[in-house]
Amino acid sequence: MIKTISGMDSVNTTVLGADEIILNMGPQHPSTHGVLRVKLKLDGERVAGSECIIGYLHRGVEKIAEHRSYQQFAPYVDRMDYVAAVSNGLGYCEAVEKLLGTEAPPRARVVRTILTELQRIASHLLWLGTHALDIGALTPVFYCFREREEILKIFEKYCGARLTTHAFRIGGLQYETYDGFEEDTKRFCNDFSKKIDEYETLLTENRIWVGRTKGVGILNAADAIALGVTGPVLRASGVKWDLRKAQPYAAYDQYEFDIPTRETGDTYDRYVVRMEEMRQSRRICLQAVENIPTGPIMARIGKVLKPPPGEVYHSIEAPKGELGYYIVSDGTTQPYRVRVRPPSFINLQAFDKMAKGSLIADVVAIIGTIDIVLGEVDR
Amino acid sequence: MTQRLKARFGDAFREASLDRKQAIVTIALEQLREISRYCRDEEKFDMLVDLTAVDWPKREKRFDVVLNLYSFAKNERLRLKAHAGETEPAPSVCEIWPAANWMERECYDMFGIVFEGHPNLTRILLPDEWQGHPLRKDYDILKQDTDWVRENLGIESGQ
């Protein structure tokens, strides 16, 4: 039985040039950040075409959502982008709040902002560690995880969980911030800028790093917009756009921060953008922690949520890109349809464009630089 | 903007509404490609944010193909909706926004909506040999679970 393998208009195994082979970077691979299968059509060591095969982590989250109530679905959301669970929770809770027509009280919004920015730093740290590890730099991963440990400790003190936090509730927060939350955050942020400088001394001017990442996986701005790419990948390609500034949510309109952008859109640019984003997140955290307003942390919405029939699309700037929730309600306690717009899924479409013409070693760098989490790609 | 759309595509335009302050325009399915091209070129909605579908089984045309668009220049969002019947093919917008490629494959995989003009319409999240389209409302996961447990384990499932 011959299964015709036709790919994303670039891998066509029925027509192979004389020197071309198909190489399978299988689902089990140390550098594919999860269960991602990439079929590479190679001409010597150059990639002539590629096809990403996903779905190994598909759990049917959108189908499950139709059988759970709105609050019951919230923990499922964390498990999609399990590296940055707090952002997923923020997007979902805000989407349902929009559907209900309420808003979280100011104190809840500010605490949400602080936790989400800490989560962005944690997600970027994990990205940096694993990306550097894939390319061959063995040291940064230990430093990055050391910093990430501090953030996870804060999360654990706050809500009891480090990774899949379920930190936010629909309508606000469940838990009041613990005694010492502000001190912990301030201490972390104050230490952190020295730490980023440390990572920069290891990598930014490093000849090997620059050689492995400059000019690799170039994606220009027009292609990025056409392919629906968002997040740091889009900003590194030259489009100065961040949902936190363009369509602010939570408490982002109260704080000052910059949007790092670069020109070329190669792997090195994406690295610089994410490093700078970590600094900006730290800046937001410090501003936010200075005056957290007092007041209630939960809006008055009752225990049983029955949003009026209709639909809403709400998106946030997750560490990976634009994470959107399209929720359709039919007036009952269970959503009629929950669609998650996964940034990693859509950013991964650009992989083929970025990888054409590069070497196999660059493929690993490109997969790392798009910053995908298979839980989100497959849901 | 709805005035311009109506003027341009009068017969394909079905209705426009605002739900929770978000603009939704319902159009006819056949004109999806032309209207998308118009939205991208003239109304400057250059990014296709999301393409998905919703299943309303009791309606005659059961699927709602939903496109979420975003304009960088105007910082505005728009939702385009079109009704599609069960076996009715929908025009693919891949050539207008290449982002639609995988999103349409996912719609096909989950709902069974065939997109005409798509370069490679195969299943993306589920294995290629999977039967059925999970996100349809008549795909009962609870029943599958109880049937499997009854058959293979001989007990009643606790779900």
Image: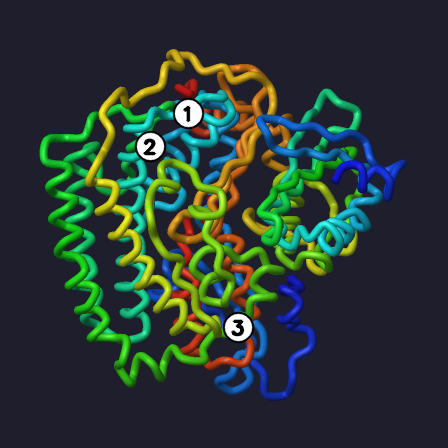
Q: Which residue is mark 3?
A: A40
Name the residue nearer the viewer: A106 or B17.
A106
The circle drawn on residue A109 is 2
Q: CA distance from mark 1 to mark 2?
A: 9 Å
Residue lying at 75% horizontally and 34% vertically, measured from the top left: B26
> CB under 8 Å between callouts 1 and 2?
yes
Q: How many neighbours does mark 3 have within 10 angstroms: few (below 14), some (14-19), or many (20 or more)?
A: many
| Residues at marks 3 and 1, CA–CA distance in whole angstroms | 48 Å
Q: How many marks?
A: 3
Q: Earlier in the sequence, mark 3 or mark 2?
A: 3
Left or right, B142 with reference to B61: left
Q: Secondary structure at mark 2?
A: helix
Q: Residue at x 28, y 33 (%)?
A: A167
Image position, residue A245 (x, y; %) = 44, 48
CA–CA distance in space, label 3 to label 2: 45 Å
Could you tell me which chain the residue with mark 2 belongs to?
A: A
Would you name the residue on which mark 1 appears? A103
